[in-house]
Amino acid sequence: MTTKNAAAAVSRRDLANAIRALAMDAVQQANSGHPGMPMGMADIAEVLWNDFVRHNPANPAWPNRDRFVLSNGHGSMLLYAVAHLAGYPLSMDELRRFRQLGARTPGHPEHDLSIGIETTTGPLGQGLANAVGMALAERLLAARFNRPGLAVVDHYTYVFLGDGCLMEGISHEAASLAGTLGLGKLICLYDDNGISIDGEVHGWFRDDTPARFRAYGWQVVPDVDGHDPQAVKAALLAARQNSSQPTLICCKTVIGYGAPNLQGTEATHGAPLGAKEVAAAREKLGWPHAPFEVPDAIRARWDARAAGAAAETAWREVLASYRAAHPALAAELERRLDGRLPDDWAATASAAIAKLAADKAPKATRKASLDTLNAISPGLADLLGGSADLTGSNLTRLSTSVPVSREQPDGNYVFYGVREFAMGAIMNGVALHGGFIPYGGTFLVFSDYARNALRMAALMKIRSIFVLTHDSIGLGEDGPTHQPVEHVASLQIVPNLRVWRPCDAAETAIAWCDAIERGDGPTCLVLSRQNLPLQERDESRLAAVRRGGYVLKDCANPEIILIASGSEVGLAIEAAGQLSEQGRRVRVVSMPSLPLFLQQDAAYRQSVLPEGVAKRVAIEAGVPDLWHRVVGPAGRVIGMTRFGESAPAAQVFAHFGFTVENVVKNVQAM
């Protein structure tokens, strides 16, 4: 039989069994992993990837590809198997090295576009929210750039998700918003196998999932046999015909399908099958091939390189016509999809900083944030803003903001509702999709709700910007439930998460520009509710703000250094004035981003905090722990070691010792 005829004789079940075999072999070799989901969803994956997903293994990043998100990311071997079989640069050796140090096949991949991984989630449910962000980005870009007969933005977002994803609360947040916005190109395939790590989910998960999603405004295709390729294909076709609603396809599957003694049980969920069961599964599936061996005929049917190249070529022909007809739009679209800032960005940023630095009126840094956004937004259409039901408090809505809605697909501001976690994960999906710089606001104290989305943004090194206002006990009367105490410190210890707590309008503008220019990670802008005075600086000190910490006020041969961030910088300046009147030589250091300062070279850090000056007092209305890294063993920290109180801000600050008198007292005590 010729290779062509052999390939034609391959059945869909044979193609799916290639996924099953690679998954159980890799997990068995690693002695670690989750074989059950890949074996259970293999038939669904085969239909989706071979009949529907437009992608090009030779150029995984081409902009108009369909997006695929593995929300039940523990089943990563399914995605690795598909990527390998489809022709992505993922070798069989890498599959053999599954879950090993340095391999391209970790247990829970996050983002590796070079091998076709848009994003997957170890923390269940976030993938669904990421996918909502991707579908939202596609909708907004299409509305902005497509022209009659020239659909340069036109692709779907597909999601695999499981019972665990639907049990996580973020699934409600994200699905509710997706239904409200009518994201018709979002198609989710639910692995309804009734099993989680603890066993049959009936004991703790009896939701009527189809009714739940219908209530959100989704189209639901229920009771699909996940092991019947024709049923799966029909469901996907029905999903694609509905452009006004996202779709949930409920696929009845058997976890660990093909493992004769263990299928349908939690034993296949998170552990290797064992050598004897792997052998029995090979026999049951009719897969006589050695571990990690895939026949050429099956490889030939899986290979997506030719079809992918043809799909991209067809799109590029449309793009060429679009360039000819709409050159300015085409240039803007390509710049944004490439992740490049406008050519005049440096001038825009400089002008915004200069404007904010020249405004002498005291203002809250949340207001300075809005002023900065209004200054830069005319030349930066990439911005996609929003707030978790705190727009009027976060001040994230610009004068030019247009709300996104089902009826207004060409907006640039998302009312996320009271959904902090989903907001963060949706922003991450928008950032991963490309074409936008997402930012979203909530109170700093509620960053706890979004914490894992912040962590995932840092881990994936993507540009999501979190506007976190009401930054301290300075918010006053709302009391300790709303007064963040530990939050700045807890965010600062997240690797690759840049945290800014500016002291005035100038530092706020610089922090915003740094966040926008930063392409390798997320940023938190921690902003005040109360008005703060503008500090005086020369050009060199203004430039030094970008180093995270700098000398704001100096003297000859300082003997004392006061270090502060945010609203407490003004307090440090006042205390320095009183100490100077007493004949003390005081330097004041503003530290808007402590971790960024600690990343600077030793010579710069020494120039700001000389080793010979041991008398140091740090002042911040938060937990003191991290400040001990800069005050040293002889220094002191005026901070918060307990929760706040409900009272007017000035009284709360005084109650906890954030006064000139207390700062002076601490200096004198040294």
Image (tube, grey):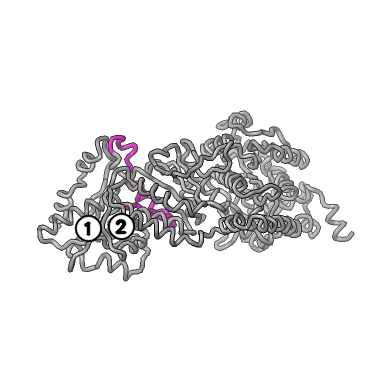
Decide: is 380 above or below 650. below
Q: Find the residue positioned furthest to the right.
A: 1
- Tell me what residue is drawn at x 88 percent, y 60 percent: 2
Check disc 1: other Cα within 10 Å, few if <14, some if 14-19, many if 20+: many
The residue at which mark 1 appears reads as 562
Decide: is 190 above or below 438. above
Location of residue 442 (image quadrant): top left
Q: Find the residue positioned furthest to the left.
A: 582
Q: Find the residue positioned furthest to the front.
A: 325
Q: Quadrant of the C terminus?
A: bottom left
Q: Quadrant of the N terminus?
A: bottom right
Is the magenta region chiefly helix, strand or loop? Answer: loop
Depth check: give the residue in front, 138 or 452.
138
Q: Position of residue 36 (x, y in %)?
A: 65, 45
Location of residue 314 (image quadrant): bottom right
Q: Is residue 372 magenta?
A: no
Q: Is residue 485 magenta?
A: yes
- SS assignment at label 1: strand
> Do the residues bearing badges 2 and 1 touch, measured as CB atoms within 8 Å?
no
Residue range in magenta is 476-502
- Residue type, mark 2 in image: Met
The residue at which mark 2 appears reads as 591
Check disc 2: other Cα within 10 Å, few if <14, some if 14-19, many if 20+: many
Query: Separation of disc 2 and disc 1 at Cα?
Result: 10 Å
Q: Position of residue 403 (x, y in %)?
A: 51, 40
- Residue type, mark 1 in image: Leu
Residue 392 in sight: yes
